[in-house]
Amino acid sequence: MAQFLNLHFSSPTTISPLLNRPRRLFPCPLLQFLTRTRSAPSRIYAVSDLSETAAVVSSGNGGMPVSPGILVDAVTEAELKENGFRSTRRTKLVCTIGTSTCGVDQIEALAVGGMNVARINMCHGDHAWHREVVRRVRRLNEEKGFAVAVMMDTEGSEIHMGDLPADAPSAKAEDGEIWTFSVRHFNSPIPDRTISVNYEGFAEDVRPGDELLVDGGMVRFDVIEKLGPDVKCRCTDPGLLLPRANLTFWRDGNLVRERNAMLPTISSKDWLDIDFGIAEGVDFIAVSFVKSAEVIHHLKSYIAARSRKR
C-alpha cells in the first residue's frame, strides 16, 4: 500500500515532509520514507509513513532533528548507497501492553524505545481497559508524531487457566505439591492451590497418568485422580503459575489433540472482541489456532461488512 511524500522547502535549510494523512486500514502499513537535510547530507533519516503530523527536519545545529515528529531510524549516506532501503530496520517490534505498561508515560517510553505495534491481549482485562489503551496509543501518535499500530490478539479456543486464588498475579508450584484443576465456576474465593479451567470438557478428557503442561512446559503436573469436575495433579516440574496461562495435556508422550480439534477457531467471545476491535479501529487482529484458510476468508469478509456500517 503506497503512500506519497511531498517535500515543501520552507527555507534553504529546512525540509518539511508533508505526509498524506492515511486512513487506518487493515493491515496497517509500516513502510518508511527517507528524508535528509540539505546542509548535512551525511545523515539520512527514516520517517514512518503513519504519522498524522508532518515531521520537520532542520539542518540547523549540525543537522539535528528539532521537530516533534519522531524519526525512527538513522543511517549514514554511505550505508544507504551500499545497501539501499535495506539500511532501514525491517524487523518490527510488537510489545504487549499490560498493567505495568499501560500508562501514558510507559507507552511513550516503549515507543521511544522502538515499539512499532502495541498488542492488547483479549485474554486479560475488559473492553473499557483495552479501549483506554487504544486511545492512549492514538493520542500519542497524534500529539507526538509516532506511528505505533494497535494489534488486538483474540483469546481463541485454547484451553487455559482462569484467575489464581486470591486474584494473585502469580503463584509458585513446588515439586510434589497437589493442585486441583477444576471446571467449576467459583462465586466465592477460589480455594488454595485450586485453578479454574475454561474448558467444560476438561475433566472428562484427561485421564490419570496424563501429563499436564502449563505455558508450554514452564510448569508440569501429573494427573493422579479425577473427582467429578475436579482433577487432582501432582507437580513434577516446579515453576511460576500465571493467570490465563494455556494448558496442554500429553498421553504416552503424545499431545492430546482430539478435543482441541473440535473447538471452534473463533469463539463467541472472540466475535464480541472482534466487534470491539472494529469499533475502535485497531490495525491488526490476530487469531490463534487457525485450522484452514476458510477461517481467514470468513473473518476478512466479516470485518469488511462491519466496517462499512461504521
Image (cartoon, grey):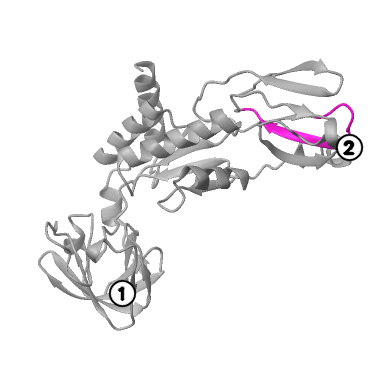
**Crowd class of label 2 (few under 14; some 14 to 19; many from 20; radius 10 Å):** few
Q: Can residue 59 be spotted in the picture?
A: yes
**Crowd class of label 1 (few under 14; some 14 to 19; many from 20; radius 10 Å):** many
Q: Amino acid at mark 1?
A: Phe
Give me the residue at 70% from left, 43% from top: 89
Horizontal side, residue 125 vs residue 27: left or right: left
Image position of 280 with respect to 172: above or below: above
Quarter of the figure with the N terminus: top right
> Closest to the observer: 226 or 107?
107
Query: Over which residues does the magenta segment extend?
Result: 36-49
Inspect the magenta stretch and tell me whether residue 45 lies in it. yes
In the rendered image, which residue does mark 1 sit on?
A: 221
User: Which circle, 2 or 1, is nearer the viewer?
Assistant: 2
Give the tally of numbered discs.
Answer: 2
Query: Which residue in the rendered view is the most extreme toward the bottom?
Result: 176
Give the distance between the C-alpha atoms of the residues marked 2 and 1, in whole angstroms.
59 Å
